[in-house]
């Protein structure tokens, strides 16, 4: 059975994840077993849980709009804990996805709690500050800036949750390996960012 699954996954993930290996070894019977009905409910909930990219942005092709990440499943001290991270630029769609996930786990008899939420930041392709800064960058550096929408949590979402009508943009110097011990900044890009900021402020 192990060999059959190994062959199946090697074929399906060929060129993506090569040399997949499945192994099996004997293990002692644990002193405590999760009751079968709870096992079944947990497995069904995990199988039914939406995980991965849910939708893409229409105005920015190739950019994720909202997603769900089934991050942690663990059993410890008589408690089974499942942690899911939901990200979305749309608050209404995030709420709908959270409700769907809650329903799946509630049907399995789980208690669902929400925590650590922050507002999504809905991108605006017609943003006045975006148009101003694009023109400023072209004039200052004689090239078109790279404009990106990223699927990540930013302070802009928190600010927009308090001031929903505020027009905003996020920009900065070039970073490598952010949020890690190896994070570093490209020093010349700091001066470039500063000049860009001053030129933008003069225009607005």
Image (cartoon, helix red, strand yellow):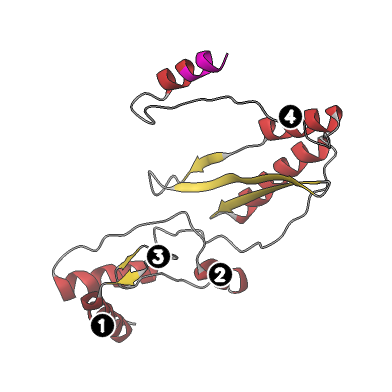
Which residue has dot 3 on it?
Answer: 178
Q: Quadrant of residue 107?
A: top right
Determine whether the residue tagged by mark 2 lies in a helix, strand or loop. helix
Q: Which mark is residue 160?
A: 2
Task: Please tell me whether mark 4 or mark 2 is closer to you in this view.
Answer: 4
**Could you tell me which secondary element the residue under label 3 belongs to?**
loop
Q: Which of the two discs, 4 and 3, labels the residue nearer the N terminus?
A: 4
Query: Which element type, helix, strand or loop, lies under badge 1?
Result: helix
- Relative depth, front residue between 43 and 201: 43
Marks 4 & 2, CB-CB < 8 Å contact: no
Q: State the CA–CA distance, disc 3 to disc 2.
A: 23 Å
Check the image and name the residue furthest to the left.
142
User: Quick one: 18 or 30, which is closer to the camera?
Assistant: 30
Q: Residues in magenta?
A: 1-6
What is the secondary structure assignment of the residue under circle 4? helix
Q: Are marks 4 and 1 in contact (CB under 8 Å)?
A: no
Labels 3 & 1 near each other (Cβ < 8 A)? no
Per the rendering, the mark at residue 44 is 4
Query: In whole angstroms, how far apart are the C-alphas of marks 4 and 3?
Result: 36 Å
Pointer 3 with pointer 2, Cβ within 8 A: no
Observer able to see residue 164: no
Disc 1 to disc 2, C-alpha distance: 24 Å
Mark 4 or 2, nearer chain start: 4
Q: Could you tell me which residue is drawn at 51 percent across and 58 percent down?
A: 122
Residue 136 pos. (x, y %) = 24, 74
Which residue is drawn at the image coordinates 79% and 49% (left, top)? 112
Counting residues from the start of the chain, the first of labels 4 and 1 encountered is: 4
Residue under label 1: 199
Residue located at (39% from left, 49% from top): 60
Label 3 vs label 2, nearer the camera = 3
Closer-to-camera residue (125/57): 57
The tag earlier along the polypeptide, 3 or 2, is 2
């Amino acid at each position: 059975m192990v060999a059959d699954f190994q062959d199946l996954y090697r074929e399906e993930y060929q060129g993506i994840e090569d040399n997949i290996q499945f192994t099996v070894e004997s293990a002692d019977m644990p002193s405590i077993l999760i009751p079968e009905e709870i096992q079944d409910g947990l497995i069904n909930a995990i199988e039914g849980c939406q995980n991965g990219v849910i939708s893409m942005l229409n105005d920015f092709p190739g950019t994720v709009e909202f997603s769900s990440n089934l991050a942690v499943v663990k059993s410890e001290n008589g408690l089974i804990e499942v942690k899911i991270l939901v990200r979305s630029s749309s608050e209404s769609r995030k709420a709908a996805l959270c409700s769907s996930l809650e329903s799946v786990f509630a049907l399995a008899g789980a208690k669902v709690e929400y925590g650590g939420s922050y507002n999504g930041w809905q991108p605006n392709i017609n943003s006045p500050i975006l148009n101003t800064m694009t023109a400023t960058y072209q004039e200052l550096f004689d090239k078109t800036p790279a404009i990106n929408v990223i699927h990540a949590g930013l302070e802009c979402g928190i600010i927009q949750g308090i001031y929903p009508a505020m027009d905003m943009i996020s920009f900065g110097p070039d970073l490598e390996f952010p949020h890690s011990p190896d994070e570093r900044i490209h020093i010349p890009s700091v001066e470039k960012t500063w000049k860009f900021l001053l030129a933008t402020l003069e225009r607005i």
